[in-house]
Amino acid sequence: MTREGLLAGTGAGILRSLFLTLRLRLEDRSGILEEMFREPAILCFWHNRILGITLAFDRVYPKRRHGVTVLTSPSKDGEILARLVAAFGMGSVRGSSSRRGSQALLELVRLVKSGRDIAITPDGPRGPRYALGPGAVHLAQSTGAPILPVHAKFSRCVRMKTWDGFVVPMPFSTVSVTIDRSFAVPEGLPEQEFEAHRKKLEEILRHGAD
């Protein structure tokens, strides 16, 4: 087994044990958990909220939907994350703004059109923290899929000394996850209007961060 595989396997085991102790409070303003919500969606959340969103996916993601694919970086850290999310039943596409960006976007477009939901951390993989890159907005514009901003807050947690202040919930704490109202991006926006949509989405996500 590779080093990445060993780290991912160990991490998945630790997370499953931690998740068993956590309480989840969920608010679904988007309706994605309802039977009538059939279209694929782009789930957008800050990089440091990954564990809270993974907990919610593991607990409540509807089996009737076609699954989630996570955009991860092509780095070694991205490989570990890709293997880790696979342990929780999620797929992955490797790419970032600096490496494999255009190929990853094309693959994500194909997956959305096949019915898959896509999860993107728009300030990852290297930051700056809470600065939203254009990738999620481009994907929404290319596919017509709605963006669902997702927020996670933690009653008790540890914040790592990383670029994003990665949040790890404490055992027996409560994770509050909010799936916000859908955010649509029209096709063919001129540059100024595209930037206005990007900024608005950034503000929505920042408003939900603590």
Image (spheres, rainbow, N blue to C red):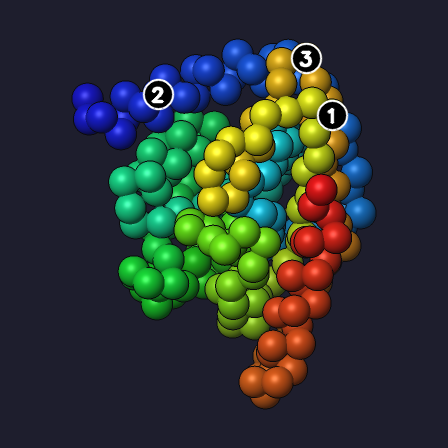
Q: In this view of the protein, which residue sits in the foreground, 166 or 106?
A: 166
Circle nearer the viewer, 1 or 2: 1
Q: Is residue 110 above or below residue 18?
A: below
**Residue 4: x percent and y percent?**
26, 29
The residue located at (64%, 25%) in the rendering is: 157
Q: Secondary structure at mark 2?
A: helix
Count neighbours of disc 2 (C-alpha within 10 A) and say few if under 14, some if 14 to 19, many if 20 or more.
some
Disc 1 and disc 2: Cα gap in Å? 27 Å
**Residue 193: x percent and y percent?**
65, 82
First in sequence: mark 3 vs mark 1: 1
Q: Amino acid at mark 1?
A: Ser
**Residue on which the image places disc 2:** 9
Q: Is residue 98 above or below residue 3?
A: below
Circle nearer the viewer, 3 or 2: 3
Q: Amino acid at mark 2?
A: Gly
- Left/right of residue 74 with respect to residue 41 in the rendered view: left
Q: Quadrant of the N terminus?
A: top left
First in sequence: mark 1 vs mark 2: 2
The residue located at (42%, 49%) in the rendering is: 125
Q: Secondary structure at mark 3?
A: loop
**Residue on which the image places disc 3:** 172
Count neighbours of disc 3 (C-alpha within 10 A) and say few if under 14, some if 14 to 19, many if 20 or more.
some
**Residue 76: x percent and y percent?**
27, 40
**Residue on which the image places disc 1:** 155
Residue at the limit of the structure toward the bottom, as seen here: 190
Q: Name the quadrant containing residue 169.
A: top right
Disc 3 and disc 1: Cα gap in Å? 10 Å
**Residue 50: x percent and y percent?**
54, 37
